Amino acid sequence: MSLEILFTGTGTSVGIPMIGCHCPVCTSSDPRNTRWRSSVYIRTAKTAVVIDTPPDFRQQMLQFKIERLDGVVFTHAHADHFLGFDDIRRFNTLKSAPIAAYADPVTLAEIRSVFHYIGNKPSAQGLYRPLINFHEAVEPFQIGDLRFTPVEVCHGVRMTGYLVQTAQASIGYVPDCCGMPDEAIKTFKGVDLMILDALRYRPHPAHFCVRQSLEVLEKIGAKRSCLTHICHDIEHATLAAELPPGVEPAYDGLRIRLPGAAGSAAPDTDKVHASRVQRESAL
Ligand SMILES: [Zn+2]
Ligand SMILES: [Zn+2]
Ligand SMILES: [Zn+2]
C-alpha cells in the first residue's frame, strides 16, 4: 500500500508573498515561489492525517480538494502551525465522528488554552464547533495504518517532529528546527523521505539555514530530502539548481508517493500551474 505526502504549505510564518513586499520572489510568476504556511497531508488507502493546521488550513483543504481526515498531529504551538484548527469541524461533519488530535503535552496544553471551547461533546447552544479527542503524544502512536513516533528537536520552544511509518515506507517531518540532538538523527536515519526546515541562506536563531539543514540531512542520509519552511530570501529555481543530488526545495502542491518506481515520485507540474491560475482567479 503506498504512502502519499502532499505539501499543503511550505512557507515560513508570514507566507510568501509577504504582505507589502515587492521583492522578486514575492512578485514572482513561478507558482513555486508562492508558499502557504507549512503543513503536510499524509495518506494511505485507509488513513488521512494532517501535520499542523496553519492559518491557511481552510484554503489549503479547498485548494487541494481534501475531503477526508482521520487525525491531526501538531508539531508545536507557534501561531503559523495551529491557528487554522477551528476549521477542522467540516471534517467532523464529513466523517460523522470526532477527530483525534495529537501533540506533545506542552504543545497540547497551549493549543487547548487558545481553543478552550473545543472538546468532544457538541455545544449545548447548537454552535458549530470541532469535535476532538485530544491525546498526548509521548510514545509512538497509531492513526489507522500510520505509525507516528514523536521526536523532540530544538526550536526555542517545545517542538516535536515526527517519524511517520507504514509497513513499507518512512517519512521524517521537522518543519521548524535550530538543532537536532544525536538521538533524533538516529531515529530519522535512512528514512525514505526527510523533510527539514531551511528558512533562508543566512543563519537565524530559531531555524536552520540552508547550509545547516544540508549538514544535518547528510547525517540522516535519507533516500530523498526536501527543504521546507522557506522565506522570501529563497528563490525556488535558484535554490533547486544549487542543491546536491537527492535534496530539493519543497513547494506547495508537491506530491510524493512512497514506495514507488522512479517515475511515480515526479511532481505533477501541470497541477501546480493549474492551482496557481485557480488561486489567482479567486483573488
Ligand atoms: Zn513555523
Ligand atoms: Zn518579498
Ligand atoms: Zn515555530
Image (spheres, grey):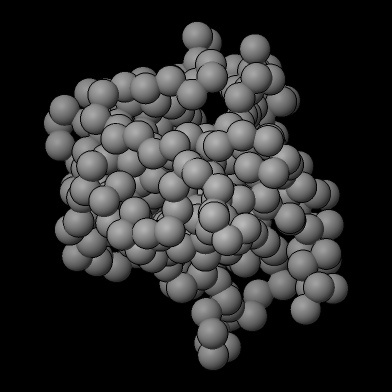
Q: Is residue 242 left or right of residue 210?
A: right
Point out residue 220 in the picture as x, y percentages from the top left corner: 30, 29
Query: 21 or 173, which is in the foreground?
Result: 173
Q: Residue at x 26, y 51 (%)?
A: 109
Q: Quadrant of residue 184?
A: top left
Q: Residue at x 65, y 19 (%)?
A: 46
In the image, is residue 176 above or below residue 188?
Answer: below
Q: Position of residue 120 (x, y in %)?
A: 47, 42
Residue 77 coordinates in the image, percent (x, y): 32, 57
Residue at (72% x, 72% y) in the render: 29
Q: Nearer the viewer, residue 125 or 2?
A: 125
Residue lying farthest front?
124
Where is residue 257 drawn, in percent x and y? 64, 27
Quadrant position of the N terminus in the picture: top right
Instruction: Give the quadrant of the C terminus.
Output: bottom right
210 or 4, nearer to the observer: 4
